[in-house]
């Protein structure tokens, strides 16, 4: 894992978001203000423009560079949250993260999710991206503790993300703009849960391809 891996994962995440742009726009139009996908794609464009710098870095500094760009371009509620995610992962990655194994990466991912929780002041059950991120981090850590292989983890995490993304449909939103709708927030998948799930799936597929 190095800056080239980080950039390849960003490219994969961006392609998946672009392919689902209309759907994510509709979800945020239903329970938010409709800008979530625009915010994210603006960030992805800015990251693509940083390609040479990101690719030249080691893993943690590449993530920090990307995080700073996300903070200054994405905006909305989700910009600072994704910034916290990336810096949280970077800070928890040891100096030799370029060769990190499953256990080290599981710890770093969990630290990233923890940082999002501190920033957004919420856990599971409030119909946000946390409803995807926390179960994925939990399963990742549990699998790492049980000695799972990288391939097993890359197969399993997208499934956990999808199942938990779908579960946001029936939840009542208690955080973010969607909470203003009260009961009317039910019946719609949370846009941040959907975008996070898509990015997790895309990144897992990218890393699996890299390894093949
Ligand atoms: P905004 O709501 O400011 O327009 P975005 O549209 O970019 O921001 O992002 C909306 C998404 O942000 C929501 O779908 C939800 O998943 C996520 N979100 C909002 N508030 C929080 C929070 N406090 N903690 C975690 N995620 C949140
Ligand atoms: Mg919005």
Image (tube, rainbow, N blue to C red):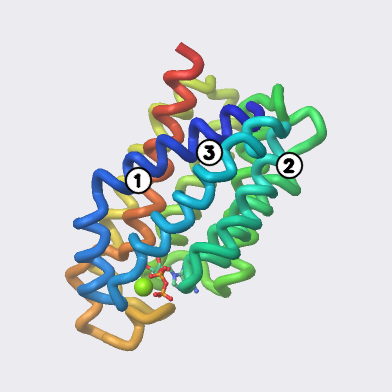
Q: Earlier in the sequence, mark 1 or mark 3?
A: 3
Residue at (57%, 38%) from the top-left corner? 51
Q: Report the disc number at residue 198.
A: 1
Query: Which numbered mark, 2 or 1, is in the foreground of this view?
Result: 2
Residue at (67%, 40%) from the top-left corner? 62
Query: Which numbered mark, 1 or 3, is in the foreground of this view?
Result: 1
Tag 1 near tag 3, CB within 8 Å = no
Q: Nearer the viewer, residue 183 or 6?
A: 6
Q: Residues within 10 Å of mark 3 (few under 14, many from 20)?
A: many
Q: Is 59 left or right of 142, judged from the image as shown?
A: right
Tag 2 near tag 1, CB within 8 Å = no
Q: Is residue 185 placed above or below 170 in the rendered structure?
A: below
Secondary element at image label 3? helix
Residue 60 percent location from the top left of the image: 72, 40
Residue under label 2: 61
Is the CB atom of the residue marked by disc 2 within 8 angstroms of ligand 1's nearest atom? no
Q: Nearer the viewer, residue 129 or 69?
A: 69
Residue at (69%, 27%) from the top-left corner? 100
Residue at (24%, 49%) from the top-left corner? 20
Residue 52 percent location from the top left of the image: 62, 34
Query: Which numbered mark, 2 or 3, is in the foreground of this view?
Result: 2
Secondary element at image label 2? helix
Residue 6 percent location from the top left of the image: 57, 35
């Amino acid at each position: 894992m190095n800056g080239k891996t980080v950039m390849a994962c960003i490219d994969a995440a961006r392609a998946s978001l672009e392919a689902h742009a209309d759907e994510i726009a509709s979800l945020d139009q239903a329970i938010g203000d409709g800008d979530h996908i625009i915010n994210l794609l603006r960030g992805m464009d800015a990251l693509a423009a940083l390609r040479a710098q990101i690719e030249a870095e080691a893993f943690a500094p590449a993530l920090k560079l990307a995080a700073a760009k996300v903070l200054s371009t994405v905006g909305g509620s989700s910009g600072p949250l994704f910034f916290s995610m990336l810096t949280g992962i970077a800070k928890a990655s040891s100096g030799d993260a370029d060769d990190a194994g499953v256990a080290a990466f599981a710890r770093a991912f969990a630290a990233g999710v923890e940082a999002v929780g501190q920033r957004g002041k919420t856990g599971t059950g409030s119909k946000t991206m946390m409803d995807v991120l926390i179960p994925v981090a939990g399963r990742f850590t549990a699998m790492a503790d049980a000695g799972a292989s990288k391939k097993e983890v890359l197969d399993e995490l997208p499934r956990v993300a999808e199942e938990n993304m779908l579960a946001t449909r029936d939840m009542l939103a208690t955080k973010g703009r969607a909470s203003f709708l009260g009961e009317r927030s039910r019946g719609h998948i949370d846009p941040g849960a959907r975008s996070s799930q898509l990015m997790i799936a895309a990144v897992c597929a990218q890393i699996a391809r890299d390894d093949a």
